[in-house]
Image: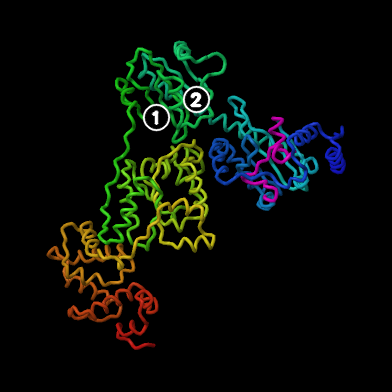
Amino acid sequence: MDQRDVRAAWQKFVERGTLSGAVRSTVAASWQRSRQHSVTVDRAKAPLVAEAELFRQRAKHAALRHAARCALQNSKTFLSDAGSIMILTDPTGLIIDTQGDARVIDAGRAVHLEHGGRWSEADIGTNAIGAALADSCPVQIHGAEHFCTEVQRWTCAAVPVHDPNDGELLGVVDISGPASTFNPQSLALAVAVGHHVESVLAQLARQDKEQLLCDFIAKRASWATEECILLDRRGAILHATERGLRAMKDNGLNTDGEAPTRFLKTVAFEDWPAKLRELLPHASFELVKNGSTGVGAIVVMHARRRAPGDRSAVTTRGRDGTPPAAPSRHAQASQPPTKPAAAKSPGFVAEDPNVLAIVRRVESAAARKMPILIRGETGTGKEQLARHAHAASGRSGPFIAINCAALPDSLIEAELFGYADGAFTGARSGGATGLVKEADGGTLFLDEIGDMPVALQGVLLRLLDDWTVRPVGGSALKVDVFLVSATNAALDKAIADGRFRSDLLYRLNTLEVRLPRLRERCDFDAIARQLLRKIDPGCGITAEALARLAPNHWQGNIRELGNMLARLTLGVSNGVIDEACVDAMLGQVIGQVIGQRPPPDTGSLQDVQRARILMVYAETNGNVSETARRLGVSRNTIYRALGQPRP
């Protein structure tokens, strides 16, 4: 039908509600549904969900995204110059992935044809995605066939994707572009891609089924006297003996028709144990995983004669895991899993009254699991304070430190949240747990948070919303994490410059503390002695040597002091660092900078001040202006200390 005739028919329907017999029945039915949904033709764009909701839905439909990944990547090549894009949606019409011509992707934002846009008929009227969902069949909608005026600039072809096992609607594959790019072959391409996605899903399901059956057969002897039922990830019964099914009936479950466990398909895998306990209180369960992805469960039905105090058991076994020995398996599995012991506190030195007050506040916040942000210059001991907070929290899990500035943008989600086996090209066999999951039950320390890439900030904010880890290509799971962050950056300026999100800062700094510079603290001696005990427990230092070191500027703070003490221990012959050792070290630095002999060992204040100037001069690679700035003195003072005339 000519577009002018379609537009005339559309105009007639909008004004009078009358349908023309010349309009395709698919389009006519969709127009009527659009009106029933109270969609107006002047609706300019589709609704756009919040970033956190998009993240949740992308994680929820990770299996679908994984199955479509290859087709989407290929479309980036053959659609890049075709004026079209390929789109993947969830079952509600929410766009979760796009690929293709970058210009069209950019143009699509005008109507929210982008990640997070909702394209059901109820949201934006007649369009291929919405019609494919409503009719559950392939649909092509072109130009004026769209219900909303602004969307009539587009042409699109869509096909629904179904679960190959039970036919459940999983999402839609769509090919869209400006109306001028209309091609009747687009629908055939969409159908081909849809069939490809369904075949990948079927193959993955077969692999999971094979793993479950092999797992069950290999360990069936462990439950020789028990009745077992094998469930796949969709809650379908893959195997069950007649007595096993009778045992389910004895527990009040009807096994006629659809399996009573099919509801598990909509339950997060980490919640299966609780649901199975409710469903089968006299059974024990072994969850089976492929890497970090849930595959299914082996249900062991126990006779009701078991001791009243005996609890149901749940164990988890991976592809290469080994279950406990049969005689004590259930008793051991019923015990809570043991977590690694917490790392001991490094003994954060806090004899300075101001620092002691900071430590007390941190300890109080840690006991209540309040997020802590530690500020301070490089080398002031931010990580040591974070480890002290971890120890003070009493948490039994590990302390996991992450350098935010070192996380590559392209692997942010994989590094933080892990990934399933084969989730992407180059993924490690068996998948990866992810740093956040490793910190479960313990502390996650985000160092250099001021240098965090913007992409990571959005990912982290979504994590803080609900503390749910969503591995790439895997199933979501909850974590219990105590969060400590640290930075030496000026976050207020970073927020003003658009390099850091203010909403993220407010989630991180429930308690915010600032560690002073080393030269501002009055517990220099205690810090130096503790550092020395770590560097060389058999080495001591005299009070005079400490007095000689203390006046230094210590631009690198505690870290620089540790490096200096380490160098001093190398020149000690009697196990004690004294004044002579310190003066010799200062003399070496001075000699390296200005090529002169070490100053005489007079011990005068002038010598100490001169040594301090020369040390900073060496640190700045001979930059007089920077040396003067760091020390807060004039350039003339620096020239006098160097014995050089002012240029």
Horizontal side of residue 358 vs 195, given as left or right: left
Say which residue appears at 48% left-offset and 48% top-offset.
Answer: 460
Q: Nearer the viewer, residue 225 or 554?
A: 554
C-alpha distance separating marks 1 and 2: 14 Å
Indicate the quadrant containing the C terminus: top left, top right, bottom left or bottom right. bottom left
Residue furthest out toward the left: 574
Q: Earlier in the sequence, mark 1 or mark 2?
A: 2
Q: Position of residue 436 (x, y in %)?
A: 42, 44
Disc 2 marks which amino acid? Asp
Q: Would you place residue 396 above or below residue 581 in this image?
A: above
Give the residue at mark 2: 232
Say which residue appears at 59% left-offset and 38% top-offset.
Answer: 68
Q: Would you place residue 592 above or below residue 501 in this image?
A: below
Q: Position of residue 316 (x, y in %)?
A: 39, 29
Horizontal side of residue 531 vs 29, given as left or right: left
Q: Is residue 288 found inside the magenta-colored segment of the image?
A: no
Helix, strand or loop at label 2? It is strand
Q: Would you place residue 546 above or below residue 367 in this image?
A: below
The stretch of residues the image draws in magenta is 109-136
